[in-house]
Each structure stands twice: as structure tokens, then as C-alpha cells.
Amino acid sequence: MSKLSFRARALDASKPMPVFHTEDLPDLPEYTAINRAVPQMPTGMEKEEESERHLQRAMSAQQVYGAVENLVIPTPPAQVGVGYYEDLYEGQFKPQKQFVHVQALNMEQDYPEYDMDSDDERWMNTHNKRSSAMTLEPQQFEEMMDRLEKGSGQQPVTLQEAKLLLKEDDDLIKAVYDYWLKKRNKSPHPLIAQVRTEKRDGSTTNNPYVAFRRRTEKMQTRKNRKNDEASYEKMLKLRRDLNRAVTLLEMVKRREKSKRELLHLTIEIVEKRYQSDDFSGQLLAEVMAQRHQRPSYTPSPVPNGSLYAAMQGNRPDWANRINGEQVQVVRKKREYKKRKHKTASAAHVKEEHGRAHPTTPTYSDMDLHKYDFPSSEEDVSPAQSAEEDTDNDPDGSFAFRRKKGCNYYQARVDTPGNWPWEAKEEGGLGDPRYRYSCTTLSMPRRCVGFVRRRVGRGGRVILDRVFTPFDNALEDLDLSNSSSLPNGLPPSWLTDIRNKKWRHFRPRSPPSEDDSSPSQAPPSFSDHLSSLITFPASPPEEISAEQFHDHQQELVKVNLGMQKQQLAAQQDEAVSTILNQSFSSQPTSRFTVDSASAQFAVSAVVSNTENLDTSLKLREGPESAHNGVLEATGSGTNKVTLHLPPCSSITTELPPLPDPPCPRQPPSPNHHPRHGHYENGQSPGHPDTDHRRGSHTKSFLVIGQNGRP
Amino acid sequence: MAADWSKYFPYTNQTSCFIFYSSLSKMADDKENKKIGLKTTLDMVVEGCRLPVKMSILPNEEEEWPLAEILSRKEEKGKLEFYVHYIDFNKRLDEWVLPDRLRVEELQFPRKDQKTPQKQTSSAANSRPTTPDRELQEKKTTVDRSESDSPSPSLLSKKLSLPEQTSSPAAKLGGQGQTPQSQTKSNAGRKRKAIFLDEKQDLPPAYCNSLSSQDSQDAPATPQPSAPPQQPRQTGSMSSSHDENIITRIKNIETIELGKYRIKPWYFSPYPPELTTISIVFICEFCLKYVKSRKCLERHRTKCTLRHPPGNEIYRKSTISFFEIDGRKNKMYSQNLCLLAKLFLDHKTLYYDTDPFLFYVMTEYDIKGFHIVGFFSKEKESTEDYNVACILTLPPYQRKGYGKLLIEFSYELSKFEGKTGSPEKPLSDLGLLSYRSYWSQTILEILVNLKPENGERPQVTINEICELTSIRKEDVISTLQHLNLINYYKGQYIITLSQESIDTHNRAMAKRKIRIDAKCLHWTPKDWAKRGKW
């Protein structure tokens, strides 16, 4: 058996090794030659130190005897030799049963680091003897020395600085300071022994007395904290929540302030009443009555409070912030609805595009901002938020806005109100101009049958449609009207229309630019115009509005007022009929063709409409102006609510209204058509009712029509 | 090699050549000196010289005159003293001696052949940090030159003036001339050393005296295979090589007073330099603050209320307690502890702050409080699975089994962590002995107590031993091998226990009266990697 022919395998730490007693293996020494195969492990010592004599002796002893008992490595002596130990460590210390646990805060020492030495003690004793008034306690002395020492850098502190450092009596400070300065100047080292620390210039790299340098590099790479989106959003949310909390607290603060103010005011009132002997409360009642006459503007919660808030430029930021958030939520819903609308009508889509494009990016921006800069909520200026609101409100710039100084009353549900389109029996004014009448829209250009006009909130014109037997025919009429009038064979009622026996309402632009119209404009038209212009004004103010208009135009026509009054009387008569429907016999203004065809059309109708037609045609000439009008009209049409009253009530026998033969044309200066148009629109603008405000342009555009007989 | 270096440092070439020649002439001087050996005076005994010196600290009463190297000399109150390092003895035995303990007639001058041109070049122009082959290279060079000119009286007086400049360690604090010294190194010395180490072990000490002197002289200077960078590595607590600075080779604190003990330090420690001039540094036993006088300590004791290390107690059984101190949270104490420990640990480095360490301080309770017995530090996160960085039993408590208790505790912590661990290297001589002893006893304890299963011979794997003890695999193998327990027998490794080793083990275990009781340890390991900060 050749034991040595095998090479020893590597030592496998996971392989079980049988444990033998040496006595059981008498043949073991024969195998020991292979023992060199057992890996030689390093001792872990510095090589040169391994050779040290004492260690070698000890190691060999350990190997031989298994212990080093008798062969210790000699070390410098340490002995118990402090006789005064008891004095230094006085008292006893009994620990608790529990393990000692220290608080991190308790580790900081609050005693002076400076320890008084024998010299100090001597000086202090002599000092105390000299000035018995101000005896120094050792710790007090140490405290002072400590502050002086720590207050000084390379240069010792000056006496002035020392006085700032020490809160002691001036004489005492001076004494200690002098002593300290002398001592410090004598010593090349700081008086509080401290381990040398590194200097920034790197000169201390090799200084063996410099210790505990800061580790400049990172010790170990550790996993980067996941900076993922979720945690980021959490942080944002947290910040928002905290902002809200701050807002809430600010609001509470305001509330409490207001309450305090109220209290002070109450006190003041009581004092004033007392001074003026108002014990019966009479004075107060008077004042209160006065106060109620002129009720001050009080904010009330409105659905779109954000707009309200935006209007209040002077409101503090927090209000806007809050409202801004609410609006953001609401807005989304609206946007969604709007999208649906888009598909409703082509015209609207067109309009929608015009507006949606600027708004949509704003929207996404907002959403982004909300996450990127949550603080932007605070930064949004009132004006900006107002703009945003405008953009995002489906009503756009025509959205309802409260006006300062206006009183707003709750809607009355019991009675329809004194609207001109309501019959007198129902409490309305029964204005004949608002009766159901044949109506032609300008865009899309078609007749919609019999329609009653109403003014809705914000000045929108709402058309209530009603069923009549003429509906089909009327549609044909308008189509034939726009193409070629003579080809059609109009029925007799059509002639009636043409003859202005029936009212025919056609929305159109106001005739401000009618400078081409003949000078002999009939007063009836002027009346009609004025009514057209004042149309959006609420009916109760009709008279005053017309008066205002008259006044404006009194240079042109003198007898205007007369005819108007006359007309008003006629209207009253007409209204008395049960069905407030009248058909204007005014010819259509559908002409966009050249003057020749206009002439032709005019020839087919009553002569006195000729002027008007021409003027209309001319007015519609410039395409740009027309487009502008049309677009707005289109949007208006979209919002037409088709209100069908019971059809049975409609009768076709309508008393023809006496109609002033000729429209009046005010000789206005040579304005740009569109400009003039607006000018005229604004001139009768009576700033009295709220729903006129803010929707001025729009209402005008829709109402640009001659609904007047 | 000289040519190689001159390629890189053409400007220093001439200088180095000059030194080279002067060295040659110095060798000639050496021979002359030996001829006039009787004339040698103490003035000739300068730094770098070697001569037999009578050792004062020896385990037995025998008088011994080992060869020693003069590291420094000083003259105080007319009395000349020499700081000597005994060759082949640990630095802790280095001491200041009076001239009467020098055997001047056997004086060996610094060997000039070691001052090769390469060295000069590298020290002059190359900032490569190295270990010094000798201390005070520069000073020696000047001395050499003067000697090489001619040993005239005027030159001798010059030499005499040298020690005055370095009359006290404190005077060296200014540190002028430190940097050049620190950069002197021997590159060639290493090769030589590697050869001689082997030779020396075979040769009787007396025979290889000259050889070993060269060897041993170079030995402390041996640079680590990886040359240490300008700044030491930031992990661990040990300097990977000897500090080449002469200052750190000389003990700077004469005596410390800690509690009721007066202790002679073993090594240099960077206490504030002003404390090196006084004979005793007073250290508060509980907060480890160092002050310059008893009066100051008295004053300090009136203010310091500590009666235990300022950390949480995590272990207590009978009078033995362990306190855990975070090197980041309690910097002052940790630094004081490190300064104290450095007095007794040669390779400990205090270069960097204590933040990445935890300190486990073992205390013994008596009516006065919890007295520090020893401690070990531990990296919060060790890249090399060290479970101990520095470990120390304070000298008054040594040889009483406390060291083993500390080690046992460190492995107990590792068991709680579910890891194996090992002490950071390099180990000191005492550290190696203690660890080997602990490992031996722990492993033997397992082996002896193995019971035969089903009549079969008991078996054990190295991994099992590791798991049971938390001792790292390499240490287990090294111990088994060191104890001659592992043998290759008939195609497999076996463990053999001799009755002798069992008896020795039983005797040793009988002495270990204090043991760590895991039930008394209330401690949960922290995952410091998750904390971000140490």
C-alpha cells in the first residue's frame, strides 16, 4: 500500500471529517508526511513581528504545552499605586437592577471643560482674599476661563470681547481676563488640552499628533434610496396637504380676527349709544333701517365662486388658492361635457376648435403644474386665475360674473316675471316685438318657422319655436329666397310676408354703417332700429333706453320720439290679442348677391324696402366683418333652446300690424363697418342689469336683427 | 537600479552619485573606527547605532544584553539618555536608558551600504510614501558626511549639538524635518529581508547576529506589498504598515494614571503634545478625559458625574457588564477611548474619526462604579466580515482571562448577527496568542464533546464548527492545523485528538471561570447599511 503516492485532496469545509483519538490510529505517523498538504494559514500578524523572540517562545510553548502559562510576553509594568483614589472618586454608586441606559441628550456635558489647576487655585484664593465682596467659586472661575479659551482662536480675545463673553461683574472680568491672558501668553499651547485636529491646507497629513480626521470620501456605497415617482408624488401630496393645513389655520386666524373686530365694533356701538342716550334703541333702529336701504354687498356662495373670487382682485391669496383648487376639479367635468358638444353641430365644432385650441394646452399645462409646482397655487395671481377660469368655462368670456355693487336676487319661480315676451295676462309686458313671429336665421341661413324671442341669462337670445302649418313652406321660402326669388311661386301668405303683413324676424347686424342709406330714412325704421338695439335691455327699461337712443340720434331725426310713442300704442293694442304672434312683412335681408339681383328682389316687394335691402347688402359686403358676425351668431344658434308651447294655441289669423313704411338710416360718419357696428351696439348699452354685462358683445351679435315691425 | 532611477530623476543623479561615493568612503571609516574602538565615546552613540543594551524588563531575573538600536538621545539636567529599541523584541519594551546600560565597546555604526543611491533618489524626488528603513535618515546623512570628511573635534562637537535639538520629544512636536524622514524608505531592503527571514530561522541567534541585525533592522521597515497611499485607507482601525515617522516610534507618554492604576504606556499615542512633557497624564476612569495634573482631575471629578461608560448596557452578569458606544453619537468618549487604547496597541490608527465604529466596553462593577477593563471596537459595516477592529484588555487586567472574555463576547455578537467573523489584521503578538488560545479552546470544546452516533465514529465538518462558533472558516482551519488536529489519513482528512491535548484543554477550561452567558446579552443587531449614517 503506497500511501504517499496519493496526493492529498483539497480540504473541503463541508465534508464531514471523522474524529479519532490518536491512540486509535497507531499508524498515523506514517501518513503525516502528507500533512504538508494541509493548507498553511497565515497568522495574521505583521511578518517582521512574528519573529519577535518572546512571541516565538510563547508560540512554541503553546504548541508544545497547549498553553503559555509560564512563558508570558513581558509588558511594561502596571501597578496599583494611587493612594488618593478614594478622594478622587468619592461616594458610592449603586446601579439599578435594569441595564444602564443613557439618553442621547444626557451625553452632552454642561460643565466647563476647563479644569482648574494648582496655579489657578492659588490665584483664585488670593483674589478671593483681596476682594471679599466678589468671591469666585471654582466652577465659576472655570466657566470664565472656559469661555475665554473657547472664544479665542489664534489670537486671544480682547478685554472688550471678554466682557461680552462673560456675564459677570466688570472688575471680576478684568481680573480673570488679566490672569487668563498672562497664563495663555506663557503657554505655547491652548490651556485646554485638546487633540490636534487637521487643517484645511493639508499640511497636517503626516503629523502624527493629528488624529480623528474626517473621512472625506464616502465610506461605502449604499443603495440609493429609490427616488421613484410614487414617493415623489407622495411628497407632493404631503406638501399640498400641509399647505391646506396652513390655509385652514390662516382662515381660522382671520375668522378669529373678525370675531374680535365684531366684538370691538359692538362695544363701540354700545358706547356710542350710551353717549347719545339711546337707551330705547330708537337710534339704533333708525340706523339699522338706513343700513337696510342700502344693503352692502355681501358675498354669497355661488356655484362658480372661483369667478367671483377672481373678480375680487384685492382678496388675499388664500382665497384664490382654495378656489383655484376647487375649480380645477370642476373644470374637468366641464371639459368632458364640452367634448360631447363638439359632435353636436358642425358649426359648433368650428367654434370649438377656435377656442379649444388655446384652452386645451392650457389645461394640460395646468395639470402638469399641479404636480410640478404645487406651490404655483399660491403664486397664481388673481388676474391669471380669472383668465384661466374664463378659458375653461364653457361660457368663455360670456360667463356670468358678479359685479361689485350689484344686488342679486334669487330667481322667482312663482311667476315668470315682467318679461316682454310674456303675455300681459301672465304678468309680462307683452311686447309685440317678442311675439311669435316668422324667423330666419342668418347662419345657417334658413327659416326656422315661428319663433318667440326671449332674453336669457347673460343676454343670450333664446328662441322658442312653435309649430305652425307653414313650417315646411317657410323652409322652402327661405331657400328660394336666398337663391332666386322670382322662380318660386309664393303662396298668398308669402305675399303677406313680403308685404309686411306678417312680422318676419331676421337676425342681422345692426345698421350702424348704413351711411349708404338714403337720407329720407323712414321714422319707423329708426324706431325699429332703436328697438333692435335696445333689445337686450330688459323690457322695463325699454322706454328709457329708447329715450337714450333718441337723444343720441336727435340730430338726425326730430320726430322720432313721436312715432315711437305712436308705435308703442299700437303695440299695446296688438299685445292685447291672445296670441302674441305677428308677422313682419318686411322683406328678407338674405341678399348677399350683387346689387342687380338686389334690385330685382326689391322690385318684387314693396318699394319702401328697397333702401333697406341695399343697405343690408352693402353692410354684409365685407366678408371679414360678416364672418365675425356669423361665427358668433352660429354659437348663439347653438344655444337656442327650442321651446314649443302648445301648438293648438296658434292661430294664423293675425292682425297685421301697421308698419312704418320706411326704415330710417342714421347718417353716421364713414366708419369701418365692423367698428361702427360695435359702436352702435354699445351706445345703447344700459349698464343697469347684470345679465347685460359681460355678455355684451355676444348678445349684440345675436340680436343684430330687425325684429321690429 | 541606480541607472533606472536616474532615468526618471536626471537632476538628482549627480547628488545620488555623490552620496554613493561618500558612503563608500564611510565604509572605510568604519574600519578605522573599529581599530580605534577603545576610543569610542558616548558622543559616537548617535541615532541608528546598534549596540548591546541591558534589558530591564525580563520575565526572569537573568541579565540579558540583546542588541539594541539607538532611536533617539536626549540630555536632561546633564544626564544623557538614549532611547533604545531591542532588536527582535516588541516595541513596547523600548525604553530610555542611561549610558551605563550600553555596552559601548560593541557599538556598530549605522550601516552605510543601506543608504543606496536609489534610496536617496527616491526620498529626495519621489514622494512615494514608504516605510523608513531607518529613522532619521537625513540626520544620519549629515553625520555621515561630517564623519567621512574627518573625525575632527569640531565635528564631534557638532554631533553633540544634534541631541540638544532633539532633547525632548516635545521639542520635536514642531515637526520640522519630519516629512523628509517619513519619506525615506528602502526598496531594496525588502528583497533582502525575504531571503534573510528564512535563513535566520534556521540559524542560531548568535551565529546570525550580523545577518539578523541587518534583517531585523530592515524588518520593521518592510513595506506592505501594496504601498500605502499618502492617506491611509478609510476602512478598518489598523494601520496597514508601520508608521515610518520617528516620532511615532518613541513612546511619548511616560505614565498614565487611570483610576487607581499607574500604567506605563507601550506605544505612542497622539495625546495633545503638551501632555507629553509631563510625567503623568491623569485620566478620568469613567469618561476617560485626560488632564495634566491631579488637581485638574480632582476638579474634573467634581463635575463629571459618570460612573459607567456613557453608553447603553447590553450585557450584565455578576460584576461583568458590556456597554455599547456609538462612535458617531458619542465622539468625545470614543476619541478618549481610542487615545487610551493607542497607548497599548501598536498598529491601531487614529488617523480618521470614530464614526464608523461601535465600541464595546467591558467593565467590572464595584461600589465605585463600572470600571473599564477592556474593550473592543467593531465596524458598523465591515467589508471583510471583521467582527472586531481593535481589542484590548487594559494592562492591569491582563492575564486574568478578560481577553478571552472579550473575544468570546465578540463572537457572541456575531452569533446574534448570524455571521461568522474574524478580527481585523494585523494581529499583535498578544492578540495572536489570545485568539489562538480562544479558537483552540472553543474548537476543542466542540470536538471533545462530540458524541458517537449509533456507535459510529463522530463526524464534523468545518462548516459546522463555523456555524456553532461564528469563527471564520480560515481561522478554524488555521487552528486545527496549528494544533495538529487535522491529518490526511487514507485518502481523507480526519481529526485526531490526543489524550494530551484533551487533558490540556480540560485544564485550560477549568481556568476559564468567567464565561459569557448568551442569556444575559440583550442586544439586537442593527443593519447599518439601511441607516445611511454610521
Image (spheres, coloured by chain):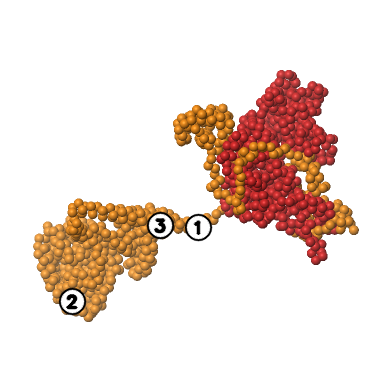
Chain colours: A orange, B red
- Residue A303 location, x and y as percent? 32, 64
Q: Earlier in the sequence, mark 3 or mark 2?
A: 3
Amino acid marked by disc 3: Arg
- Residue B459 location, x and y as percent? 79, 60
- Residue A697 sits in quarter: bottom left
Q: Residue at x 24, y 58 (%)?
A: A296
Q: Nearer the viewer, residue B1 or A163?
A: A163
Name the subunit of mark 3: A
Q: Evaluate whether residue A214 shows in this view.
A: no
Q: Residue at x 69, y 53 (%)?
A: B516
What's the CA distance linking mark 2 and mark 1? 70 Å
What's the CA distance linking mark 3 and mark 1? 20 Å
In this figure, which residue is indicated by the disc labeled 2? Answer: A579
Q: Nearer the viewer, residue A585 or B249?
A: B249
In this figure, which residue is indicated by the disc labeled 1? Answer: A231
Answer with left or right where residue B126 lies relative to residue A680.
Answer: right
Crowding near pointer 3: few (<14 within 10 Å), some, many (20+)? some
Kind of element beneath mark 1: helix
Crowding near pointer 2: few (<14 within 10 Å), some, many (20+)? some
